[in-house]
Amino acid sequence: MTQDTRFTSYQIFIIGTLALLQFAIVLDFMVMSPLSAQLMPSLKINPTQFGLVVSAYAFSAGASGLLAAGFADKFDRKRLLLFFMAGFLIGTLLCGLAPNYPFLLGARIVTGLFGGVIGSVSFAIITDLFEVQQRGRVMGFVQMAFAVSQVLGLPVGLYLSNIWDWHAPFLMIVVVATPLWFVIAMRMRPVNAHLALQKKQSAAGHLLATVSKPFYLRAFAATTLLATGGFMLMPFGAAFAVNNLGIGMDDLPVIYLATGVVSMIAGPLIGKLTDRYSPMPLFLAGTILSIVLVLVYTHLGITPLWALIVLNAVLFVGITARMISSSTLVTSVPTTADRGAFMGVNSSVAQISGGIASATAGLIIHQTESGMLENYPLLGWVVATSMVICALLFWGITKAVRKRDRALAKG
């Protein structure tokens, strides 16, 4: 590794801080999936209503991201991060105190309004502070939050929910994330170099200029399809495992723990490979692996615990490869002046499309009186199809980025 690509001590601090923050955000979303087996009978709701709880977060996150996108490049990114993080903590606390379904639905909307913007602000900070040759490794560590949330967060959250009830994991997130807010406030430096590049343009004008660029629209389309798979399959993953695959509630933490350990190991390695070989080959490899295993998984019947653990672990290697490589590629699309707005819109597109996917999945899936979920194989084919189209879009974006960079290098 050359001197230019080594991380400074402050960059290491930023990576660790954003990874911890991503852990809290990811856990807040992912914990809904394993809680589905408890939450639906506890609140006496059906899959359609549960899908609405998941999609409510996504829709509100998408809406707030669009509203914030026009302002995203006009403020210090550190201040934006602190503001939206505070709102996220309040929303998550309300989830932990929710006494019924309507209150929980409202709390998820509040959480989404703030939590949905945090990811785009974090990625804008990464792009501002790290060179393109470093971003694969940075994304590898930051996206490792998905794995850590499975290794530490989900098993602990499920354990607490089994001792008390489904409220406990949300309260745990608040306890973990609140000290991080103060660390960011005291130690992170202002991230405001982009302010000098801003034109005298209204927030609405800046947003309109961003969403009207054809190249950006292609990236937004790819992100739309990228979000489909997770939001369709994951919210009902625990209910499918328990009711269709014959897995006991007490075995769910073991599945998430094993899958998370594999993902933790894979994340940094995939990040290094992304920096060495470029994002697209890793994205294609992850896509092929994911398609095969999604189709296998959604067509399973009663399955031994060990087989499900192996299948989930390998599937998440493919998902991790897609996440890290696509995130790295997307950071190369916007110009510096548009970075915050682009990331905000991109995050909103992912959230909104995910909300539609989750709500659609809730309509497609039918739960019988015995608890089994029907039509899950159909979801597998929908997700596989979206992955193929998404790969084609990212292939074209990669070629366009290379062409633009060569033109800029020639002057």
Image (cartoon, grey):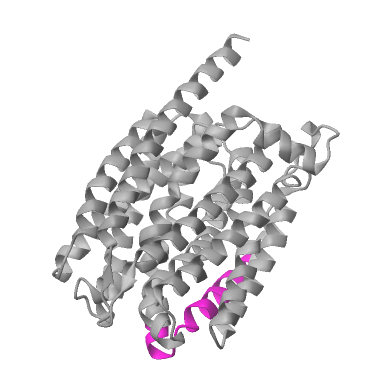
Q: Residue furthest top?
A: 410
Task: Give the quadrant of the C terminus.
Answer: top right
Could you say which is closer to the camera, residue 63 or residue 271? Answer: 63
Number of numbered labels in the structure image: 0
Q: Is residue 17 above or below residue 181?
A: above
Q: Residue at x 54, y 80 (%)?
A: 171
**Quadrant of the rendered structure where residue 385 is?**
top left
Is residue 16 something that shows in the picture? yes
* Residue in the picture at 35% in, 56% down: 264
The magenta span reads: 159-180
Whether the magenta-drawn stretch holds residue 208 is answered as no
Q: Is residue 338 above or below residue 371?
A: above
Identify the residue at image location x=63%, y=67%.
Answer: 88
The answer to whether residue 301 is left or right of residue 351 is: left
Where residue 150 appears, as percent x and y from the top left, is 37, 65
Q: Position of residue 144 (x, y in %)?
A: 42, 54
| Left or right of residue 148, residue 330 in this image | right
Q: Residue furthest bottom?
A: 164
Q: Quadrant of the N terminus?
A: top left
In the rendering, at what x and y percent does residue 255 appear? 27, 68
Residue 135 appears in view: no
Q: Is residue 320 left or right of residue 299?
A: right
- Quarter of the figure with residue 164: bottom left
Observer-nearest residue: 108 or 121? 108
Residue drawn at the location 56% of the way across and 79% of the way down: 104
The spot of residue 254 in percent (x, y) is 27, 72
**Secondary structure that dominates the magenta span:** helix
- In this picture, residue 402 sits left or right of residue 249: right
Furthest residue in direction right, as rendered: 200
In which quarter of the view is residue 386 placed? top left
Q: Is residue 170 inside the magenta stretch?
A: yes
